[in-house]
Structure formats: C-alpha cells, structure tokens
Amino acid sequence: MQKQLLVYGGGKFGSHVFEKFHETFRLFIIDNDPNCSASSLPISKDYSTNWNHIRDQINHTKDSLFILGDIEIVMHFLEEIPFEYLIPVVPIHVMKEIILKSLNNWFPEINFKNGTIPPIPPDLIPKELQIFSENSYTIFFSYAKWEEKCPINCSGPLGYCPIHKRLKPISITDLCRTAWPNPSNFLFESYQLAPGIGGIPSTEIRKKLGKLRNLCEKEFNNPRGVKSAKISEEILVCTTCNCHGVASGLTYVK
C-alpha cells in the first residue's frame, strides 16, 4: 500500500506539503474553506462533508484527495484510515482539539473545559526563548521573536538558529518534557519530514489517546472520586519541535 499523509489545512503551507510530497505519498488534505489554496491543486476533490461518501472514495481510489471538512474528519481518519503522519497546518492547537473531542466522545457525562497550565521551573527557561500567551490555558514557545519570520523551508537545527543568529540551549520538546514530567502531560513531537514541514506519527497519536483513555477510566471509576461533587484535574497537551511549541491545559469536573 502506498504510504499516506494526512494534512489538516489547505492554505499556503498545505499546498507546500503537496509540492514536496505528492510524488512519493498519497495525500489527504482537509480544509473547511472550499476556496482555499489546496482546492485548486490537481487532485480529486470531495465537497460532500459526508464521511461515508469520503470513506468510499478513499477506499476505492488510489488518488490524493482534497476533502472539505474540519476536525471531525480528522477524528474519522484516526479511527478508520491508516496514515503515516498528521501534518497540522492550521492556526489552532490541533492536538488539543483532538484530545478534547476524544474525551467528550468517551465520557459524555464529564464536563471538560480549558484548564490552567502548571508553571515552568524558571531555571529551565533560557534567555533566548520567547514565551507568550493571551490567556492562562494556552502558551506558545518560540526561538523566533514576535516580529521575526521563519522561512518556509527552514531545517530547524538543534542548538543554534542560523536564520536569527541565536543559540537554542534546549529544544522545545525537551523543555516541555522536562518541565512537566507527570503522566497527565501528553506531548506530541512534530518530526521534520522536509525543510519547513513537520509531522506527528499517527502511531504516537493513537498510542497516547489509548493511554489517556485508560488513565481517565481509572480516575472516573474510582469510587472515592464519585463521592466528591467536584473533582478537578489538569491534563496538559503539548505539540513541539526543536524551535517552536504550544501547550494547552484542560480540566474536568465530575
């Protein structure tokens, strides 16, 4: 079977992924804008938004496919369709949305919502690193300053940024892994598949979703917990690479 990539986002970067990989991978590009850049690519299109129709087209052709849809279609892929990597190129924290959708599907009786992110030990934060946020439940990390632009074909090397001439004493992946070592930190590393293109292995996503479900089932089935009217816990979701990252907090109340 030809290897498959799932691209969530059909704008400039989604089209860039197509240019790099369409000769070696079967691509599924998902976007909720029927007029996005990827909609004009020379591949098959499915504007139905009906999963049964989309699944039939996937199973009965070998073509790459542009699909009109949103995170719900991504969830269907995770549940039913084999693919190598998820390449998220939309301006939302995709893994946080996948985690939240999964939790709501598994435990409809539990109230899941945004939660406060635990503090980072100050001695872990290098002076070169930018950390910024507009709220208490999502923070962004970057070795590029706010006004700086990273090239679309950056190789993202460890240790030093040749674009902005800046040391990178610790990768964002290692920072988040070290700062929050507890079992409720679900960290998804984006691996560089080509300059400027990062992907999260589907095997890692499915494995960690299984771990999350097991942890939550143990917590929610704990008789001691049921006696309490409100039990709040933090679940942390991080998506990271060498240079950039995002962390989102979730909490739940029984």
Image: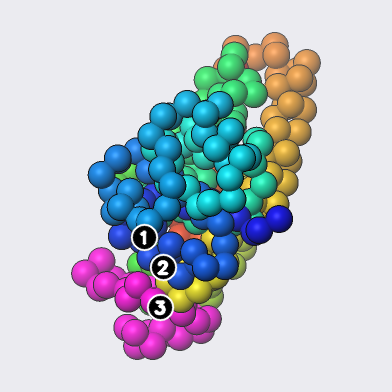
CA gap, disc 1 to disc 2? 6 Å
Query: Which stretch did the figure color magenta?
Result: 143-169
What's the residue at 47%, 48% (across, down)?
A: 65
Which residue carries the number 2 mark?
19
How crowded pointer 1 is (Cα within 10 Å; few <14, some 14-19, many 20+) is rated as many
Which mark is in front, 3 or 2?
A: 2
Please say if the residues under marks 1 and 2 sit with CB atoms less than 8 Å apart.
Answer: yes
Helix, strand or loop at mark 1: helix
The mark that comes first in sequence, 3 or 1, is: 1
In the rendered view, would you say 230 is above or below 191? above
Residue 181 in the image, given as x and y percentages of width and height: 66, 55
In this view, the residue in front, 52 or 252, is 52
Name the residue type under label 1: Ser
Q: Any mark on residue 15, and which?
A: 1
Position of residue 37 in the picture relative to residue 229 (left or right) = left
Which mark is in front, 3 or 1?
A: 1
